[in-house]
Amino acid sequence: MEEKILIIMKEVFGIEDIDETCSQRTCEKWDSMAHLNLVLELEDEFGISLEPEEIGIMTSFETVCQMVAKKAEK
């Protein structure tokens, strides 16, 4: 799942050298519009639905993975 998320992030942000340390603070392309596009792609790819408060928590690769894993369990 983490590899898939990295691929989605690379596509959404248009950056090839994204790794597990990526966050909103370290990625200048991770703005509000890119964040919404990331959420849409994740929801589509993993068949999940994210709530606004969950979306707000997703500010790094790590928290994105945690939230997707949590939602995919249900």
Image (cartoon, rainbow, N blue to C red):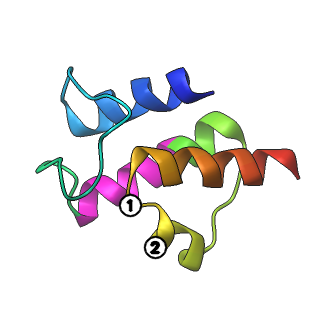
Asked if residue 53 is positioned above or below residue 10 in the image, the reply reads: below
- Disc 2 target residue: 56
Question: Which corner quadrant of the image does residue 47 belong to?
Answer: top right
Horizontal side of residue 29 vs 7, given as left or right: left
Q: Nearer the viewer, residue 12 or 19?
A: 19
Q: Position of residue 4 (x, y in %)?
A: 53, 24
Q: Main secondary structure of the magenta part?
A: helix
Residue 57 showing in the rendered view: yes
Residue at point 19%, 31% (across, down): 14
Q: Position of residue 67 (x, y in %)?
A: 63, 55
Name which residue type carries label 1: Thr
Name which residue type carries label 2: Gly
- Disc 1 target residue: 59
Residue at point 48%, 46% (across, down): 62
Total tally of numbered discs in the picture: 2
Residue at point 63%, 27% (across, down): 1
